[in-house]
Amino acid sequence: MHFTSILSVLGLLLIVTGSSMLLPIACSLYYNEGDLLPILYSAIITLTLGLPSWWFCRKNHELNIKDGIVIAVLGWFLVSSLSGLPFMIHGSIPSYTDAFFEMMSGYTTTGATILTDIESVPHGLLFWRSETHLLGGMGFLTLTIIFLPKGMGGLRLFRAESSPGQVITKDKFTARNRDTMIWLWVIYLALNLLQTLLLCLGGMSVFDSLCHAFGTVSTSGYSPKNASIGHYDSAYFDWVITLFMFLGGVTFILFYQMLKGDWKAVKTNTELRWYLGFLLFFCGIVSMILWKENTYASFIDSLRFGTFQVMSLLTTTGFGTADYELWPQSAQMFLYAVCFIGACAGSTTSGIKIVHYVIICKFMYATIRKIFFQPMAVVTVRINQRPLDPSTINLAICYFIVNIFMVLGGGCIMVLLDNIDYVTAMSSVISALMNIGPGFGGIGPSENFAFFSDTGKWFLSWNMMVGRLEMFSALVIFYPSFWEK
């Protein structure tokens, strides 16, 4: 491993984090609610730690995949630790464990919170809380790659933080990694700006519009309101946010291809078609249940609330417009199932991802056909009109199995740690690992994570990072052979 290069990149990462506090500082100056100095001190501390590490270790060693994984894991931990300083210094979140949990939840786009009264927190701190979504949605390592010297192996960093699904679909942008990251961020920021404008046109304040845009396109879920999107009780806001949650769940390579006029790539994208199919099925059936059970007065309202909640959970956003635990049990069952899906690989969402379900379903179909009907047939699985090699299929199956084992094992651990009911225990792990935010039981849409023990919060924080790093990068560091030369 190149330890000096690792320290250099980590230092650069802290510089990016400290510099990102400039916007919350401006927000604090505008609202003047006593949170200016805590954010300013935190920015100074973060930059003081980052600048020497970057300056004295700035050697252009080519980063290998091990370096990238170490940077990814340590980077998420360091940034979450230092980003919680403004809340601790101000006193909004005096506990280090709680501050770390809140920031890890923000950067991993989980949206789970320990705050019991969000609206009592000053605007500058709330803006910083939402900005962690903006940085984490695209992956703050992708932002750091833009500032890396040429030849330092930014692609390894991107692979360490990206989804296995992107390996499967082989999505690429341009030949140069820096150009790739710039295009990613231009598209990402453009979607945030467009949503902010649409929300402002509907009468939402600029502050609230920015915070909700940050939480929507990144599919994260932090809101500056206690009741989330339900605070506004506006059909216009609900549909605008539903649209951008959908866009946040689309593979970002497709936006780039659309800009180039390559509509054939969009038409032949297998995962996009399945994504639309999943949404139509679950939105339709949940909306029909709400209508048939007279949960809402009209079918239009049932469609509005049902579609919003399905979109929110399937894309792992976590916004809420209603307490879905008051809905019929049949609707809740479908929402629970949605939590295991996730949207497209290469999007801002987390979760298992649709591409893995596509591969597993196609492989099951082909295998059954070969065993029972066509023993001499050659089993092939095709994605985007291209055949997949066996190792790729094995990766998808392994990824799915690891997720299920993590949920089951994690649920057992949470029951032992906090002595809670199994529904809350399982749901808390699903929420953290899939980066969803709200769940069922004690962490439903009207609840929060404040009641968990410190040990439970650290365990859930670790699950958030594992889920955001798509399992393998966070788990491989526990292999003794990883640390061998």
Image (cartoon, grey):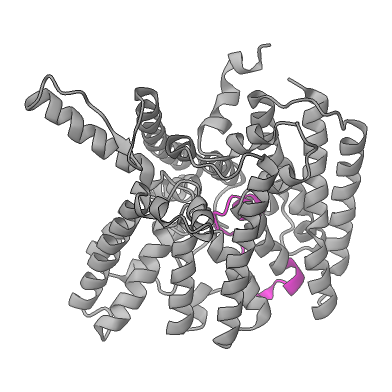
Which sits in the foreground, 275 or 311? 275
Residue 320 quadrant: bottom left
Q: Is residue 377 visible?
A: yes
Residue stretch in magenta: 102-125
Which sits in the foreground, 440 or 225? 225
**Residue at 57%, 45% in the rendered image:** 173
Q: Can you say which quadrant of the picture contains the C terminus?
A: top right
**Residue at 47%, 54% in the rendered image:** 254
Q: Residue furthest top?
A: 485
Residue 94 quadrant: bottom right
Q: Is residue 197 above or below residue 342?
A: below
Q: Is residue 256 above or below residue 481?
A: below
Q: Is residue 217 magenta?
A: no
Q: Residue furthest bottom?
A: 203
Q: Is residue 198 above or below residue 464?
A: below
- Give the percent coordinates (x, y) of residue 416: 46, 38
**Residue at 37%, 49% in the rendered image:** 269
Q: Is residue 106 magenta?
A: yes
- Give the percent coordinates (x, y) of residue 161: 59, 39
- Give the percent coordinates (x, y) of residue 479: 56, 19
Q: Is residue 340 visible?
A: no
**Residue at 27%, 57% in the rendered image:** 333
Residue 203 quadrant: bottom right
- Give the percent coordinates (x, y) of residue 461: 59, 45
Q: Is residue 326 above or below residue 75?
A: below
Q: How many marks?
A: 0
Q: Can you say which quadrant of the picture contains the N terminus?
A: top right
Q: Is residue 266 left or right of residue 447?
A: left
Q: Is residue 173 left or right of residue 341?
A: right
